[in-house]
Amino acid sequence: MCAAVLTCHISLSRADIMTQILSIQSHVAYGYVGNRAAVFPLQRLGIDVTALNTVQFSNHTGYGEFSGEIFSPSQLQKVMDGIEARGVLPAMQAVLSGYMGDERVGRVVLDAVARIKQSNPQAVYCCDPVMGDVGRGFFVHAGIPEWMRDHALPAADIATPNQFELSYLTGRDIHSLADAIDAAAALRAMGPGTVLVTSLTRDDAPEHTIEMLLDTAAGSWLVTTPRFDFATPPNGAGDFTAAVFLAHYLQGLAPQQQLEATAGAVHALFTHTFTAGTRELALIAAQDDFVMPDVIFPAERVR
């Protein structure tokens, strides 16, 4: 009896101190996008994740054909009510959101953020403003880009846009490193204190590379990694990147270390995916390497 009680006490103590977050994203049965690209990496990095799925699809829409269901805002609200009823909101240290199908889902996200911040004022909201990409343009429903700019970003503590999204959100063209730094600062002025530009391709960058830029009030850091020439770029890389960055942010690393750890994880995942020659991220094969990357790319302070 005593051993059982002791074991229970230890388990409860560990749960109390474990970092816990709420991730509100899409879900697919096959492949790795949305919560499927975020939850497992977060768990491997020691984060306890409560996943609220906004859709249940057979696969991501990039295949052209898919089946499944989009959950209504009322359904999501009921699930959120049930989560709150468990009394776990005060333990939540962050909310992570990604693709939003429409503004009504976005309002559910911001309601969840408000509930958690009321229960834990120290909690942070990490918004991945999924809207489009260079070469593809917008791939979300009409109205979402404006809603993201006017409502989601002002509520965020952390934003993880790609270059296309950063350009839209700030109304700035980005061709140089100086342009990117200025745009990131402009986005911070809209609300989020931390901005991670997840994929930066500038005119003055070295050939065959891709970069990430981390901008905070304390400074800006740039990391450069090799570019992989995928025949079909895998979906979900941005979801993975935002999740891994949030994990390292919550673990209390310095900004430069947050960026270096994130870049190393993404490079490790891309290495496995490129070697496998698959259209889906090789998330399972890469799991040890994205937790402890063999290669760490140094981040340079640029402001």
Image: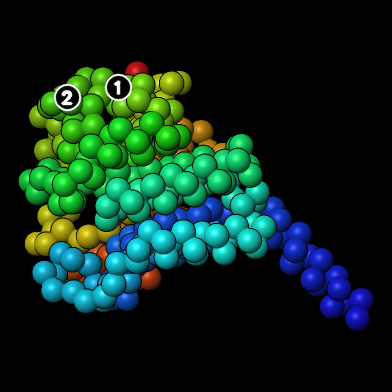
Question: Crowding near pointer 2: few (<14 within 10 Å), some, many (20+)?
Answer: some
Question: Crowding near pointer 1: few (<14 within 10 Å), some, many (20+)?
Answer: some
Residue 292 percent across, percent down from the top left: 46, 55
Task: Identify the residue at horizontal 57%, vertical 64% (top origin).
Answer: 82
Pointer 2 residue: 172
Choose top left, top right, bottom left or bottom right for residue 286.
bottom left
Farthest-out residue, right: 2
Residue in front for this viewpoint, 84 or 207? 84
Task: For the N terminus, give its image quadrant.
Answer: bottom right
Do the CB atoms of the residues marked 2 and 1 lie less than 8 Å apart? Answer: yes
Choose top left, top right, bottom left or bottom right for residue 71.
bottom left
Pointer 1 residue: 186
Residue in front for this viewpoint, 31 or 229? 31
Q: Secondary structure at mark 1?
A: helix
Q: Secondary structure at mark 2?
A: loop
Horizontally, is 206 left or right of 94 in the view?
A: left
Task: Identify the residue at horizontal 12%, vertical 55% (top origin).
Answer: 229
Farthest-out residue, front: 74
Horizontally, is 230 left or right of 273 in the view?
A: left
